[in-house]
Amino acid sequence: MRQATEATDTAAGPNRILTGTIIGGRFRVESVLAREAGTVVYRAADTQSGMPWALRIVPVSAIAHGADRMLQAVERTQALRHKNLVEVEAVGREGDFLFVATEFVDGQTLREFIDGKRAEGRGVSLKGASNLVAHVANALDYAKRMTVHGALTPAIIWVSRTGRVKVSALGLASGVPSLARHGAPSGAPETVYIAPEILAGADPTTMSDVYSLGVILHELLTGHTPGAPLRPASAVVAEIPAAVDGVIARALVHDPDARWPSATALKDALQAAAGLAGGEPRPATPTTLGRSASPALSLAPGVTAPAPPAPLVSADGAATRNANLAPVAAPPKSRDAMPAHPAPRSRSPVALPVGGPEDNVERWLVQKDRLDFGPFSMTQLRAQIERGEVLAEHRLVDNESGASCRVKEYPGLGDLAKRAHRHLEQNRRAQAEQRSAKSEKKKSFATTMIVTLVVAAVLGGVAFYVISRRDSTGGGRLASREEEAEIETFLKGVKLGGLKASVRRGGHRSPGVASGGSAEDFNNDATFGDASKGFAEGDQTLDDNQIQTTMMANYRKLIPCVVHGGVSEIAMEFVVRGTGKVSAVKVNGQRTGALPGCLLGRMQSFNFPKFNGSKTIASWSMSMGR
């Protein structure tokens, strides 16, 4: 996450928050991360757990339509748990500002990602753009059970160091509409990502998010935001199929009811048009998308969009059905209050009972510490029980009839409270065990490394004698140019250094490394994970420590290759697949030749940890001197 250059105490009013200030009773301000649309985002440390959080400060004077409305809108998003959403930890008010504490993402915004590609004279591949859009679409369609986004721009979409795509700022558009004007590239209008109906004064809908996502897709593929008239992406980048133009055009239609009815529909059409859903690329026509054909909609000269299906969400937000798609619920309109300092919520969601139509009626008060909180709807009440904010012993009061009972005595809530308590306890124990395990691991790591090096040194002579007798394929003998006595003398006098590993992050090509071999081997521009998989699947990579540990346990197997190659230093880059096996190696800028071939043959016997992802691109260096 980038660091802003401004000092934390230079702004005026509620933005003037000094380092060390405690917000919400638990978040200690450390530094400024960004200034966005009249808000300030700080890096903060949790005084309870030590974890880092991103803390957004929103001045009440800058909030449209009232602070309470925005407070309630953001609080609703706390119940959302998805791998492509930045999770909201706490929200509250202090004096003349609101604060929103969210997951801290170690990475870069999509704005920075696109600008970095442009600065290098490169763009995002069709596969990479399609996969990135798929992750964003998954996040938007999961979140719409609670809210639409309404301020989608590349500045609020994050790509973590491990390649995970996350959408942030849910619930903020109603209070800070200027967020939608933040993040446009240099030279483009600040309203470029805002749907026409929102500019005309309408409230955001699912289709307005589709419009914003369409603009982002066009920019990913071409490096530029759409202009008027719209220039087809296939006319800018020759590798893009013409069918993709129709997908983008339909997302950007002026009439919201004529656009794709959801982000998922846009994602599916893009996958089909790009040929990523199986088979050869094919046009994104109504036939291929499972819809009846009708006249095309004219968007711009030479560009048409497929005809729209029946809308899933009408202009007033009411839910409707389509024969080929599941029903979509309109964003909830209920509001609930919360204490000024919200309690931490559980990280393990509890399965909630299925409710009826009356579950959204705000009629329930909760008595805690002789104070009444609410009124809440039953849906909101269940969510608070899940987070541990309402306990089994708290008293529940029906605001309409005056009847009251303990939470544990109300049908269905007692079991829910027990399950929530059990999950919270399991979380606390798991976190305690993780802290203990990390502490023990740190203590034992140095000892393990020393023992490993000592044992390796003792056995080095014998191991080298065996290893050096075989070539890179394991089927022959290494042709030695020196006598045995000279090799032993060399090993006794050699000093090893620079034994260091690292994992490449963020899709940038390592400087000074040749680009031989397959274009995909050493390129992770499109490594955003598999959008079709579950919440925590498909986008894992190994970390620096895992690479370092495996290399330290096996690096002596590489010495015969280095000696035979006649070099004293090697700088390798290699690809580890999800199976834990090495599939490609570059050394000192070369991927072909005797030395890379020898190293690849030996490294294929290394057993790196398996991981749930496509590949990890890692680096390793070693020097030998007298």
Image (spheres, rainbow, N blue to C red):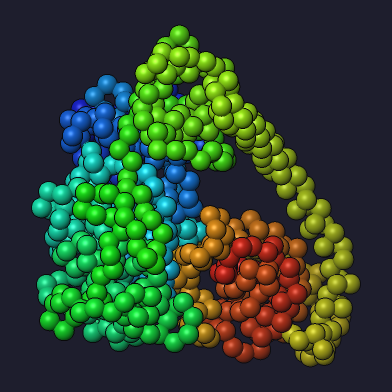
Q: Position of residue 523 (x, y in %)?
A: 48, 75
Q: Is residue 304 above or below residue 219?
A: below
Q: Position of residue 219 (x, y in %)?
A: 27, 69
Q: Report the residue at 62% width, 90% height from top.
A: 593
| Front position in the image: 75 or 472 | 75
Q: Report the residue at 40% width, 16% height from top.
A: 401
Q: Report the residue at 63% width, 83% height from top.
A: 596
Question: For the C terminus, which image quadrant?
Answer: bottom right
| Front position in the image: 481 or 183 | 183
Q: Is residue 509 above or below residue 537?
A: below
Among the 4 quarters of the image, the one containing residue 115: bottom left
Among the 4 quarters of the image, the one containing residue 479: bottom right
Q: Is residue 219 above or below residue 361?
A: below
Among the 4 quarters of the image, the one containing residue 322: bottom left
Q: Can I make out residue 415 in this image?
A: yes
Q: Can I make out residue 150 in this image?
A: no
Left or right: residue 584 compared with residue 157: right
| Front position in the image: 275 or 291 | 291
Left or right: residue 487 compared with residue 439: right
Q: Position of residue 275 (x, y in %)?
A: 42, 81
Q: Report the residue at 73% width, 71% height from top.
A: 606
| Front position in the image: 572 or 156 | 156
Outermost residue toward the top in this view:
370
Q: Position of residue 344 (x, y in %)?
A: 49, 30
